[in-house]
Image (cartoon, rainbow, N blue to C red):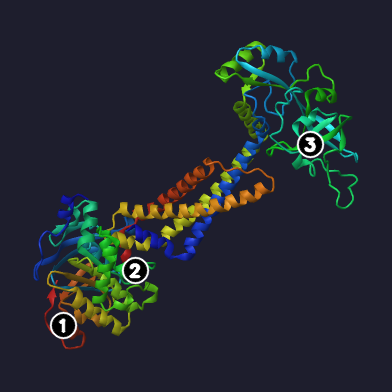
Amino acid sequence: MMSVALKMLVGDKLKYIGLVAGIAFAAMLVVQQAGILVGLAQQTGSFIRDTSQADLWVMESQVRFSQDVLPISDGTLLRTRGIEGVDWAVPMYQGFLKARLEDGTRATMILIGLDDATLMGGPPEMVSGRLADLRTDKAVLIDHDARDTKLKLKRSPRPEGEPAGLRVGDSFAINDVEVRVAGEYRASKSFFWEPVVYTTYSRALQIAPRERKLMTYLMVKVKDGHDKREVAERIRAATGLEARTSDEFIRITADYILTETGILVNFALAVGLGFLVGTLVSGQMLYNFTLDNLRYYGTLKAMGASNLRLVGMVLVQAVVVACIGYGIGLGAGSLLGKVVGDAGLAFSMPWQVPVGGFVAITLCCVIAGLISVIRVLQLEPAVVFRS
Amino acid sequence: MSATATMQAGMGTATRRGETAVHCKGVTKHYGEGTSKVWALRGIDLEIGAGELTMLVGPSGCGKTTLISVVAGILDRDDGECTVFGRDFTRMSASEKTRFRGENVGFVFQQFNLLPTLTAAENVAVPLMILGKGRSAAVKQGAEMLEKVGLKDKLKSLPSQLSGGQQQRVAIARALVHEPKLIVCDEPTSALDHDTGHVIMRMLKNVALNESRSLVIVTHDARIFEFADKIAKMDDGRIKEVSNGVAEVARRNGGGGGGGAGH
């Protein structure tokens, strides 16, 4: 009888296409919006993820996310290095500073100061120049992907053929201190808008406005054989500061951004609305589809088909239409995601997104099928004799 | 359903011409309650023998359809006795009743009720699939039955590609394919022209009817009375008269004739 159910489903092409299209649309909305949300969540932690050399990040305990600059005392560095289980510890400066390009264009940027000796915490990939070039006079590294966008010259565009933004060898000023582009790096796409510029820790302190404390983070490597969490606990006890693993730091950053900025609520609403609209549309269509076939279900019932068998037929139709609709929606959502991703916007699809979407869409179709099947169960077989 | 229940729901023994196929005594049925209460059957007494073609005739609303619904086990009576080949639907569980219908009752509807997305052969195979037969074997058997009703070349046609008469023949094949002991037909010729109606009735009489199978036909169509072994005239929920078909035709043609069995 399942073959009969499937023929009933696909036989009426127009209704079948409408059903599949409704579910595909719902699936596409759910997958695409969820993918963007996951992509954004992942981008919030891209700086920490790119700075993979450290096992632990030591920071002011009130820090809520990776760009939440709350300086700590320089003295912490030596104290941390003396803690059991610490292999090495290096300082990092991070600050939001004003830059002025050669044409007078002003921009806010994030300046990262790396340990002079080791240059630990540098960008993951160099496009031009070397990380060691930071040791040359006035040297900074700029983001290759930001040079013609966020670091674009605005007031006096260069002549035709000239690059729109900064290039290696160009000079500009950060906090009125002259720096020179020594190289370009490429990093993971970040949630945060401001371009990130790397330099050495000592040069960063020269550029940054004077404050009593300037060190932002301590990057700590844990010795082999030591438990990261235990070492973190020791650091907390010894310094009074917070020590977080990279994963923990990524998680609190994502949590803060997603919840405090309203992004999570907005995207959850978008996903929920997509799901709701899709569910209502496809549920209504599935319901109508069953009602349109009520006469035939009545006929089958009169001819001896049990309620259980009719429920099975309706559920098979619901699940099949959900699978096909979801497959198309997933494909369309992924394609759209790729276009969005190629355009530099956030999109990511870990396995949980398609699996979760599939469960949600199938569940919604099965529920719609079950609601519509109530009419089939209530159907008096004697209805077949009424014209 | 368990094997035991299946056996109980089934016929058990073969039926022969002359034996009672349907026995109804004092059957009542009403719809609605209070002021909207309507009595559809007000005490029906009816005997239908195995191998008989019985027609239920009468004006609209007289209770014909309600009576075949009760006889076919798709509607519960309020009161009275009604057995079909010795089995009383009120003594069966819902699943037993469903199984009994699937095995022993064939249906032919006024509007054919063929599933529009299935081919003719698949439509005919549906009762077999309901009884648990595999799809390919059922369709094969359905095709064989279609050959018997003269539709060998229409096996893969959809209902929409068939004429009304052809659709009704498919419906008859569907009613016969699982070899039920009782076939109930609701106005099987009313949607057809005179000639096609006669073709269908001849087919029902020749192919469907045999010594162990009974046909009950609800009809308004006086043109087909000649095919009846027995005609039960109904009015206002009661059977007013039972006559044989030949006598009824003769009477309608002004020739009088006997054979009537007052009820």
Residue at mark 2: chain: B
Q: Check if mark 1's residue and mark 3's residue have beta carbons within 8 Å.
A: no
Question: In what element is the residue under mark 3?
Answer: strand
Query: Is label 1 or label 2 in front?
Result: 2
Closer-to-camera residue (A273/A204): A204
Find disc 1 in the rendering and name its residue. Answer: B246
Residue A81 lies in quadrant: top right
Q: Check if mark 3's residue and mark 2's residue have beta carbons within 8 Å.
A: no
Q: In this view, does B23 lie to the left or right of A309?
A: left
Q: How far apart are marks 1 and 3 (CA)?
A: 109 Å
Query: Is label 1 or label 3 in front?
Result: 3
Which residue shows up at 13% across the image and 67% down it?
Answer: B47
Q: Is the residue marked by circle 1 packed among few (<14), some (14-19), or many (20+) residues within 10 Å?
A: many
Q: Which mark is residue B219?
A: none
Find disc 3 in the rendering and name its residue. Answer: A183
Q: Is residue A384 left or right of residue A83?
A: left
Find disc 2 in the rendering and name its residue. Answer: B114
Amino acid marked by disc 3: Gly
Image x and y of residue A349, in percent: 57, 43
User: Does A45 appear above or below B122?
Assistant: above
Question: In what element is the residue under mark 2?
Answer: loop
The quadrant of the rendering that contains the C terminus of chain B is: bottom left
Residue at mark 1: chain: B
Amino acid marked by disc 2: Leu
Query: Is label 3 or label 2 in front?
Result: 3
Q: Is the residue marked by circle 2 packed among few (<14), some (14-19), or many (20+) residues within 10 Å?
A: many
Closer-to-camera residue (A172/B111): A172
Image x and y of residue A244, in percent: 62, 22
Q: Which of marks 1 and 2 is nearer the N terminus?
A: 2
Both labels 1 and 2 in a single chain: yes
Image x and y of residue A109, in percent: 79, 33
